[in-house]
Amino acid sequence: MGPGPSDVHPRVLAAMGRPTIGHLDPAFVAMMDEMKDMLRYAFRTRNDLTIPVSGPGSVGMESCFVNLVEPGDKVIVCQNGAFGGRMKENVERCGGNAAMVLDGWGRPVDVQKVADALKANPGTKAVAFVHAETSTGVQSDAAAICGLARDHGAFSIVDCVTSLGGTPVLVDEWGADAVYSGSQKCLSCMPGISPLTISAGAADAIRKRNRKAQSWFMDLNLVMGYWGQGSARVYHHTAPINALYALHEALVMLEEEGLENAWARHAKMHAALRAGAEAMGLSFIVDAASRLPQLNAIAVPEGVDEAAVRRALLQRYDLEIGAGLGELAGKVWRVGLMGQSATVEHVTMFLSAMEDILSEQGAAIATGAALPAARAALAG
Ligand SMILES: Cc1ncc(COP(=O)(O)O)c(C=O)c1O
């Protein structure tokens, strides 16, 4: 129950153990096509260029920047936590200039500040932001930010690593241009694959670049030769066959459950966890209106040793939660309710284990109230 990886279903683990076939085997190529369709379903898009990138979420992130940002390009980067900072690094490493829109950790991106930054920076090539900030558990208004970018002729680059499969990611409705995710969060696959989707307009810009992308491995013009349309596939790199079996199975499971049902399950489990935690006397650092259900940043009560609590959870209950990052180190716990980790069993185990450990530490919490509150929220 940390900020990812989430629990992986035995079906997905079993899929990974299937015999390894060639990455140009017709059966594998057919599976690749199915996977592209299932990713379009998960991303709510019809984008042709929708693929799983061979590498973790960071490779998906970097693929967007190295393909869309050329030296001298101006990019507005919104930072309200740890991962926006990485976007700035990416822009600068591509030779671009990052104009920063800064918001406090735990606050969503301020849409008005993005509008002001676009006015102050004519000719901006792209606006980059994190939809679901895993470092704080906050969700930003992707529709509004992508809309502003589009109105100013800029592309949008959106990090949906933590949102895909857990909360609505509506790529076509938002009009987003370059969106990447990760396999290990709400898709509940093992880490190491990054689903990516690129709009027709952005794909066109990538095809018409003035100079080649500085990364050979992430150059989407080359990667598409392997993942492209029809049966003609050109070797680019050896695909991580067994990891892709696993992602395929995770996507089949998402389709079986239904995307809307998966979103509803995450929301329901968050409601139960919140009811239980608040009944115990714990509080959340993010306002309810912009809180992510799948990443719960809970304030560490006064006088409680946060690391000792995590250690006891792991040793006594075999339960892992995350520590705070950056500005929030030592101040919050990050509790994931992602994919297969968003179940009633996870919520009740977390609440009872927390109650046990916090009372042992002498924290001023109410005992005996959390589980009934969670049960009432689940019934509601
Ligand atoms: C919002 C966000 N972006 C990017 C990443 C990087 O993903 P990975 O660790 O798979 O490279 C993460 C990982 O936690 C993340 O939460």
Image (spheres, rainbow, N blue to C red):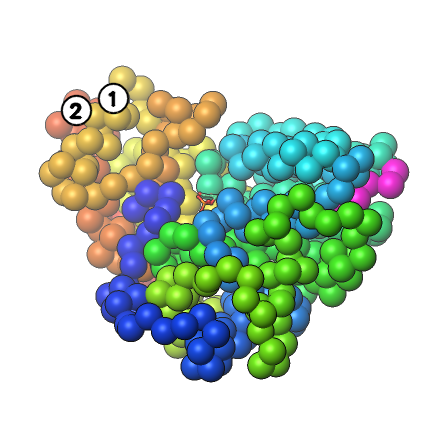
Residue carrying label 2: 361
Residue type at tag 1 = Asp
Whole-percent x, y for residue 274 in the image: 36, 45
Residue type at tag 2 = Gln
Judging from the image, what secondary structure is the residue with disc 2 in? loop
- Give the vertical position of 102 relative to 346 (above or below): above
Q: Front-most of 373 and 240?
A: 240
Judging from the image, what secondary structure is the residue with disc 1 in? loop
Q: Residue at x 54, y 71 (%)?
A: 36
Whole-percent x, y for residue 193 in the image: 45, 56
229 displayed left or right of 280: right
Q: Are marks 2 and 1 in contact (CB under 8 Å)?
A: yes
Tell me the quarter of the picture where residue 321 sits.
top left
Separation of marks 2 and 1 at Cα, in angstroms? 8 Å
Tell me the quarter of the picture where residue 342 sits.
bottom left
Q: Front-most of 60 and 338?
A: 60
- Give the vertical position of 218 relative to 122 (above or below): below
The nearer-to-camera label among 2 and 1 is 1
Which residue range is magenta in the image? 122-126
Is residue 99 rendered magenta in the image?
no
| Quadrant of the rendering where the C terminus is positioned | bottom left
Residue carrying label 1: 305
Number of labelled discs? 2
Q: Front-most of 369 and 62?
A: 62
| Mark 2 crowdedness (10 Å alpha carbons): few <14, some 14-19, many ≥20 | some
Q: Residue at x 46, y 25 (%)?
A: 326
